[in-house]
Every structure is written in C-alpha cells, then in structure tokens.
Image: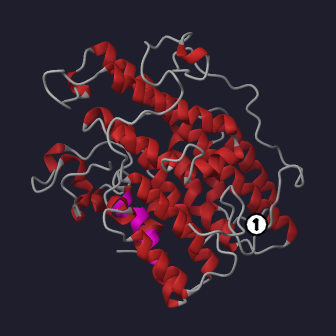
C-alpha cells in the first residue's frame, strides 16, 4: 500500500545508527562469470536448499489475479482493462529519453556481487577493495545511496528544508537525515551499512561472508526503493525518471538484472506483475505528453486534471503492491535457505545477517495492511534465528501478509 504514515523500526534503526556515524545538479537518477546460482543465492557456505527438500511451503500464487483497476498489457494488449490505449500496450518498455544512468548502477551491483556474495571463494581484502571501487564510481551507486529517500514515509516538513539544495535532495543534509532516518534511509542506514562492511572486509575484520551478506542486503534494499522512488519522480520531477525506475529493476536488460534476477527466479508471476506496474507508470506518462509547442516540457502531476492524477496514483499503487510482494519473495527465499542451514548444521551467520537487514523492512507495510501476522514477523527479526518453529511460523506469516503481487 502506498501509504505515508510513519511506522518506525526503532531497534533496527538505532542499531544501524549506533554502528555508524553530493548532489549532482543535472541528473535526477536518470561481469565476470561465477559458479553462483542465478537467483543470487550467496556462494561459499551455502547449500541449494529447496522448499520441497525441507518440507516447507513453496511459492503459491495460484489464487492471485490482477485487480479490476490494474493495467494489464499482457492480457489482450490492455484492450480489456479500464486504461486508455498507450505506448505500453505492446508489453515492452519504451524509453522516454536516452538510456538512463541507473543501468550502469545495476551493472556495478552485478560486479560487486561477483566480487563478494557470488564469489566462488571466500572474498579477500582485495575483493572488498575492488567492490568499493565499483560502489564509488562517479555518478554511481554511492552518489544515489547517499540521498535515497523512502517515499513510504512522510516528507520532511518544508519549513525545515535547506535552501542550499534541491527539494529532492534534502536528505543530503546531515541534520535532516539524522532527524528523519526512516525517510532519509539512504544516508541514515543504507550507505553506512555498505561502507562499514566494505571497510571491515578490506581490513580483514569479521567474517567476510557476513560482511558480504550485509552489503548485499543493503544494496538490494537500495534498488527496491529506487524503483518506487523513480516511478514517482517520473510524474513529479522529470519524465525520464520513468526510464530510471525501469532500469533500476531490470538493469536495462530484457531478461532482467539486479533484483529482477532474484525475483524472477523465485516467482515469474511476481516479476511479470512488477513489469506490469512499471508499464502502467510509463503508460500514464504517455497519456500526459509534452505540449507540442514546448519541446520536452512534460506536464507534472500537480498540473494534470484530477482524473489523470488519480490514474497515476492507481498505477503507482499497482507497482507498489507488486514490489512489496517481490521484496517479500526475496526475503522468503533467503528465509528458506536459512532454515535449511539450521536443519543441516551449516553456518547460519551470513544468512541471518542478510535477513536481519532485509526482513524488518517489511514490518511497516505489514503493519499498515493490518496483517494479523505483522507481530509474528517483527518478532522473528528480533530473534536469534535459531529456533526452527519460530522460523517456520515466520515463513507462514510472510506468505499471509504478502500473498499476491
């Protein structure tokens, strides 16, 4: 649900903040082989556990279907839904502008994956150093992680804004991201987690697989939020951000890179529904084109008629629902892997490190949905991850709270 109420994650937020202490003016956001699994499963001490082998429920979306209000390009090219004809009806994403810079950011994510969590050997200090180089590429991941906002949380009050930076870069102001860590999740939580664990890997501190798992979890979080954020600014800031949303999900690849790889491997249906949501936002953008007398001046959301305002909210919500299910599917797959490790006496530190970052992110949405299972999920992430009954109950709660894309 695209709600904006603030449901704080106090334990998670404070734990990360205790462990840690740039603007680019023009752009809004517009690998090597390994023996890792195609679904992004961590290499090294990981086994390829399946839900069937562990006698756990597998992904079942047989009862799921689109809402009557959803944009449905895969069904008769959208002819049977309520949306007007548009550029997305063929089911293929059509760029608004030039290929976006977010493609290169997803490629950097893939390179970091091959160096760290998909490495066929234990990552070395040099691997972490090379991964940091990928993270710090100019106009790359770091440049966006340090300003990424979670638009599910309320905006920073305008009365507190700095007049020294643009409206969409208020979270680069330390006083603001420290005061509003849930909204300013990039500089407050995501980037510090990545930086701390890259540094630990470079210095040889701690378990390299745990450090790698934490970097992975933080980057997956960043990519997930970036899709949602760019879909919004496509309507509110710059039309080309539609392209950034699509690229943050797919890496600009028709088969999907980045988090699309994770989600598609676990649920093709969820992947398809996320693509439908991205196409819905692109459809809306096409239905509100630039004035032919004003080149490339696309109308923004606050200037369109009410019916078009409502249609955007409808498409953005469709994407949001699918993304929540997609993120839940990623967490689900990692939870199954963790349960397999527990059952088979395999090192659980890396798998639990990933889940302790990735899992609590779903608490807000589960609570906002009024899911009875929200408390069970929250309790799971606060446990030590060793009790099989608690883990199995958490898996059931995850499926119940996020059943369909």
Instruction: Please determine whether, in this image, residue 71 is positioned above or below residue 11.
Output: above
Q: Nearer the viewer, residue 75 or 301?
A: 75
Q: From the image, which quarter does the C terminus lie in?
A: top right
Relative to 5, is 35 above or below?
below
Q: How is the image coloured?
A: secondary structure
Where residue 360 appears, as percent x and y from the top left, is 55, 54
Secondary structure of residue under mark 1: loop
User: In the picture shown, does residue 40 fall above or below 228?
Assistant: below
Q: Which residue is more in the foreground, 404 or 374?
A: 404
Magenta region, residue range: 186-196
Asked if the magenta segment contains residue 189, the reply would be: yes
Left or right? Give the position of 52 relative to 270: right
Location of residue 49 in the rendering, given as x and y in whole percent from the top left corner? 82, 59
Q: Main secondary structure of the magenta part?
A: helix
Q: Which residue is mark 1?
A: 386
Task: Report the side of 235 relative to 126 (left or right).
Answer: left
Is residue 402 visible in the rendered image? The answer is no
Task: Please report the residue visible at 55 percent of the width from the left and 36 percent of the height from the top.
Answer: 274
């Amino acid at each position: 649900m695209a709600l904006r109420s603030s449901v704080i994650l106090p334990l998670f937020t404070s734990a990360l903040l205790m462990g840690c202490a740039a603007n680019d003016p023009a752009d809004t956001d517009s690998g090597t082989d390994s023996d890792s699994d195609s679904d992004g499963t961590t290499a090294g001490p990981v086994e390829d556990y399946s839900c069937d082998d562990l006698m756990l429920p597998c992904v079942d979306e047989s009862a799921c279907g689109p809402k009557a209000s959803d944009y449905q390009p895969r069904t008769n090219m959208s002819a049977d839904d309520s949306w007007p004809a548009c550029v997305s009806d063929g089911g293929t994403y059509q760029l608004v502008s030039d290929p976006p810079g977010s493609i290169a950011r997803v490629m950097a994510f893939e390179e970091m994956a091959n160096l760290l969590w998909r490495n066929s050997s234990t990552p070395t200090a040099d691997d972490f150093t090379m991964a940091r180089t990928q993270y710090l590429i100019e106009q790359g991941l770091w440049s966006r992680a340090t300003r990424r906002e979670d638009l599910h949380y309320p905006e920073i009050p305008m009365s507190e804004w700095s007049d020294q930076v643009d409206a969409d870069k208020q979270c680069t102001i330390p006083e603001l991201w420290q005061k509003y860590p849930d909204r300013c999740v990039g500089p407050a939580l995501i980037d510090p987690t990545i930086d701390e664990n890259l540094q630990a890997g470079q210095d040889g501190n701690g378990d390299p697989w745990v450090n790698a798992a934490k970097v992975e979890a933080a980057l997956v979080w960043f990519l997930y939020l970036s899709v949602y954020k760019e879909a919004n600014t496509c309507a509110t800031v710059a039309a080309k951000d539609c392209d950034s949303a699509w690229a943050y999900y797919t890496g600009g690849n028709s088969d999907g890179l980045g988090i699309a790889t994770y989600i598609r491997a676990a649920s093709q249906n969820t992947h398809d529904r996320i693509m439908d949501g991205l196409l819905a936002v692109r459809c809306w953008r096409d239905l509100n084109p630039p004035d032919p007398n004003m080149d490339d001046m696309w109308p923004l959301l606050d200037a369109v008629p009410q019916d078009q305002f409502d249609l955007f909210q409808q498409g953005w919500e469709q994407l949001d629902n699918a993304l929540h299910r997609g993120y839940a599917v990623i967490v689900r797959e990692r939870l199954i892997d963790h349960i397999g490790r527990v059952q088979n006496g395999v090192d659980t530190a890396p798998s639990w490190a990933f889940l302790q970052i990735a899992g609590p992110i779903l608490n807000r949405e589960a609570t906002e949905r009024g899911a009875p299972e929200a408390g069970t999920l929250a309790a799971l992430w606060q446990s030590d991850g060793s009790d099989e009954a608690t883990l199995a109950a958490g898996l059931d709660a995850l499926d119940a709270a996020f059943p369909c894309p």
